[in-house]
Image: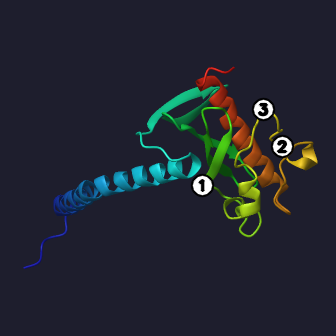
Amino acid sequence: MAAVSNLKNMVLSLTLVCLVCSAVLGGVFAVTSAPIKAAEVAKTNASIARVLPAFDSEPVRESISVDGTDYAYYRVPGAGYAVISTVSGFGGPLSLMVGIQEDGMICNTVVLSHSETPGLGAKCQTDASFIDQFKGWDPASKRLAVTKDGGDVDAITASTITSRAYSAAIANAYSVYLIIAGNE
């Protein structure tokens, strides 16, 4: 005999379905949370290793607020600082990790995320000649602005706005470095 369709049976059925779904979601979360966290830590450590010289100590995550903007950075004793800087690019946020050695020289940069136009601004992640110009960059003697704006950065062809944003992200990271290193 089929159950009678009334408010009591519908509420009971819906409650049972919600409890089962909640239990399944909780179980999936419990099983996947540790591997997801481990993958995030591995990705961050790989990025730090790409922007700083070889190191054997454990990076220490810290944060600082500069002019109302919060910056996360990693202090690596003996190697320098890996500063995460996010600015607005042409297509949206452009997030970089900038490696700055203890002497203030830019070691390297890595794009963490971007929303730039594929084939144009997205080259900020793949164009070796653009990326490599920042290796060994001395912000104290060179201006972090595209040549069109009187700076020393050679922009990506047809992507001046992205190149400006990339340079601004590095300049912001350097400003953070000056504060955390006590040089300002």
**Nearer the N terminus, badge 1 or badge 2?**
1
Give the image's coloring scheme: rainbow
Instruction: Identify the residue at horizontal 28%, vertical 55% (top origin).
Output: 29
User: Is the residue under label 3 in contact with that under label 1 (CB below 8 Å)?
Assistant: no
Tell me the element at label 1.
strand
99 to 120, vertically: above or below? above
Q: Is residue 108 left or right of residue 129?
A: left
Q: Please state, as top left, top right, bottom left or bottom right, where the N terminus lies in the image.
A: bottom left
Residue topped by disc 2: 145
Q: CA distance from mark 3 to mark 2?
A: 13 Å
Residue topped by disc 3: 140
Instruction: Identify the residue at horizontal 12%, vertical 72% (top origin).
Output: 3
What residue occupies the far bottom of the structure in this picture? Answer: 1
Q: Nearer the viewer, residue 25 or 44?
A: 44
Point out residue 133 in the picture as x, y percentages from the top left corner: 76, 52
Please name the amino acid that badge 3 sits on: Ala
Residue 121 visible within the image:
no
Q: Is residue 90 left or right of residue 101?
A: right
Please name the amino acid that badge 1 sits on: Ser
Residue 113, numbered label: 1
Instruction: Identify the residue at horizontal 71%, vertical 45% (top origin).
Output: 136
**Nearer the N terminus, badge 3 or badge 2?**
3
Point out residue 144 in the picture as x, y percentages from the top left corner: 80, 41
**Nearer the N terminus, badge 1 or badge 3?**
1
Dot 3 crowding, Cα within 10 Å, few <14, some 14–19, many 20+: few
Please name the amino acid that badge 2 sits on: Ala
Q: Please state, as top left, top right, bottom left or bottom right, where the C terminus lies in the image.
A: top right
Q: CA distance from mark 1 to mark 3?
A: 27 Å
Q: Is residue 41 left or right of residue 141?
A: left
Point out residue 137 in the picture as x, y percentages from the top left corner: 74, 43
Dot 2 crowding, Cα within 10 Å, few <14, some 14–19, many 20+: many
